[in-house]
Image (cartoon, helix red, strand yellow):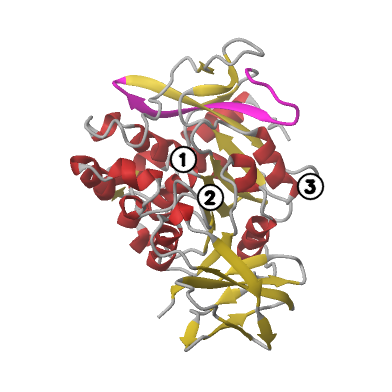
């Protein structure tokens, strides 16, 4: 729903400062980014039920920057303490998505989705395929896969994108209908990569859901890793931007969502990221999951996970690490609802790059809190999945067969 603030309220909010993160993490000045930014409503790119926002970000090449965002809270009266909320970070080719905001609104969350490349979510000419309309004061746009790595850090897109996410978090925390202690962050593809970084930079978030994107990018044999590996580019990324540089700071619950054959972010780096964070971590590998924004915000497990953290909801099924004894594999689960089905997913391909490996599945047996299955001959890697009576599915880590 649109915000209805008077001018006095706007000025008060713009002057308000959150100081919880008065420190430097990586190249970012969190004292600066934690201040509520100056912002204004805009009718450009108007969508029914959305508040269009232009908020001030850090300068680019000495010039002021404004970023565009859609914001809305659920219909009706906010619960005591305010609505839980989420910051939504788009991926490559994406922008501010009102549909994404609505999806979270339908699940009882206020949400904000911003464009991180200086655009409004409309084309320059209505109905055309021309590039999106720029804001009056745009920041940098993404240049391939860290293609601007040779520039000074302050001129690189990723540096500005992280800053804009932290700043919009500071903004949504200031809205009176939002519970500032119940805000999470989620992102898709490049947004998942940014989520992996931001959750270790901004410690005010209460949960995080990276979809596809993750950390340890140069270790991937998918598109991202191949593009980053050469020389100095790797050093710049791993020192300043990759989530792995900040995972030691992450103590909040995280849910990692990816497909078995993602071309950009492979299963090993998703798992490596999941293992590196310091808080509780849940995995959801989906067989041949398609890569896209709609596919990335569709899984209901994302919203159930958020509820389990900030709304006292029932948790998703949790897995211990699978064990192997000969051709028998087993895993112990923790489930607050009945597990209704389980599967073993496996691949026999040990030579192809991870995005090209063929995965198969077969039923597994549920015995109380243990799931077991016979591992097919010639399987080189496998993992378990479990679906509960709510039709919520999570998975174990994959393990390599002995």
State the CA–CA distance, disc 2 to disc 1.
9 Å
Residue placed most toward the observer, 286 or 112? 286
Q: Earlier in the sequence, mark 1 or mark 3?
A: 3
The quadrant of the image that shows the C terminus is bottom left
Q: What span is in magenta?
A: 44-62
Q: Are marks 1 and 3 in contact (CB under 8 Å)?
A: no
Magenta-drawn stretch contains 165: no
x, y (%) of residue 201? 38, 51
Residue lying farthest to the front in this orientation: 377
Mark 2, mark 3: which one is toward the viewer?
A: 2
Count of all numbered marks drawn on residues in the image: 3
Circle 1: element type: helix
Reading the image, the residue beneath label 3 is 77
Distance (Cα) linking label 2 and label 3 = 23 Å
Residue 141: quadrant of the picture: top left
Q: Which residue is mark 1?
A: 165
In whole angstroms, how far apart are the C-alphas of marks 1 and 3?
A: 27 Å
Determine crowd level at label 2: few under 14, some 14-19, many 20+ residues with C-alpha closer than 10 A. Answer: many
Relative to 115, say whether 401 is above or below.
below
Query: Residue at the left extreme?
Result: 231
Residue at 67% from the left image edge and 62% from the top image edge: 311
Residue pointed to by mark 2: 185
Give percent across and percent down for residue 8.
Answer: 59, 27
In the image, residue 175 above or below residue 375:
above
Decide if residue 207 is in sight here.
no
Q: Residues within 10 Å of mark 1 (few under 14, many from 20)?
A: many
Q: Position of residue 74 (x, y in %)?
A: 74, 44
Q: Are the residues at dot 2 and dot 1 in contact (C-beta closer than 8 Å)?
A: yes
Corner quadrant of residue 99: top right
């Amino acid at each position: 729903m649109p915000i209805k603030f008077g001018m006095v309220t706007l000025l008060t909010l713009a002057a308000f400062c959150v100081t919880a993160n008065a420190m430097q993490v990586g190249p970012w000045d969190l004292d600066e980014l934690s201040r509520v930014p100056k912002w204004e409503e805009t009718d450009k790119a108007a969508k029914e039920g959305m508040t269009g926002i232009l908020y001030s970000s850090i300068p680019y090449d000495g010039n002021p920057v404004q970023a565009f965002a859609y914001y809305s809270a659920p219909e009706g009266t906010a619960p005591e303490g305010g609505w839980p909320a989420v910051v939504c970070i788009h991926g490559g080719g994406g922008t501010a998505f009102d549909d994404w905001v609505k999806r979270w609104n339908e699940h009882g969350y206020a949400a904000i989705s911003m464009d991180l490349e200086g655009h409004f979510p409309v084309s320059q000419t209505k109905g055309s395929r021309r590039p999106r309309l720029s804001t009056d004061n745009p920041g940098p746009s993404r240049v391939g896969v860290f293609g601007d790595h040779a520039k000074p850090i302050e001129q690189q897109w990723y540096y500005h994108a992280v800053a804009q996410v932290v700043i919009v978090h500071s903004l949504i925390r200031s809205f009176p209908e939002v519970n500032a202690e119940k805000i999470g962050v989620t992102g898709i593809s490049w947004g998942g990569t940014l989520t992996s970084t931001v959750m270790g930079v901004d410690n005010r978030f209460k949960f995080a859901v990276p979809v596809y994107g993750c950390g340890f990018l140069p270790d991937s044999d998918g598109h991202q890793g191949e593009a980053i590996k050469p020389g100095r580019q790797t050093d710049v990324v791993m020192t300043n931007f990759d989530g792995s540089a900040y995972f030691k700071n992450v103590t909040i619950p995280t849910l990692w969502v990816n497909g078995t054959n993602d071309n950009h972010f492979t299963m090993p780096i998703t798992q490596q990221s999941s293992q590196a964070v310091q808080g509780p971590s849940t995995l959801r590998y989906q067989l041949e999951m398609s890569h896209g924004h709609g596919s990335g915000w569709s899984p209901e497990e994302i919203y159930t996970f958020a509820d389990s953290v900030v709304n006292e909801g029932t948790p998703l099924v949790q897995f211990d690490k699978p064990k192997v004894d000969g051709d028998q594999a087993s895993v112990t689960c923790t489930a607050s609802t009945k597990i209704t089905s389980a599967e073993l997913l496996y691949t026999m391909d040990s030579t192809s790059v991870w995005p090209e490996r063929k995965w198969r599945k077969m039923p597994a047996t549920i015995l109380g809190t243990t799931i077991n299955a016979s591992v097919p001959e010639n399987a080189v890697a496998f993992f378990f999945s479990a679906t509960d009576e709510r039709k919520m599915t999570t998975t174990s880590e994959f393990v390599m067969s002995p």
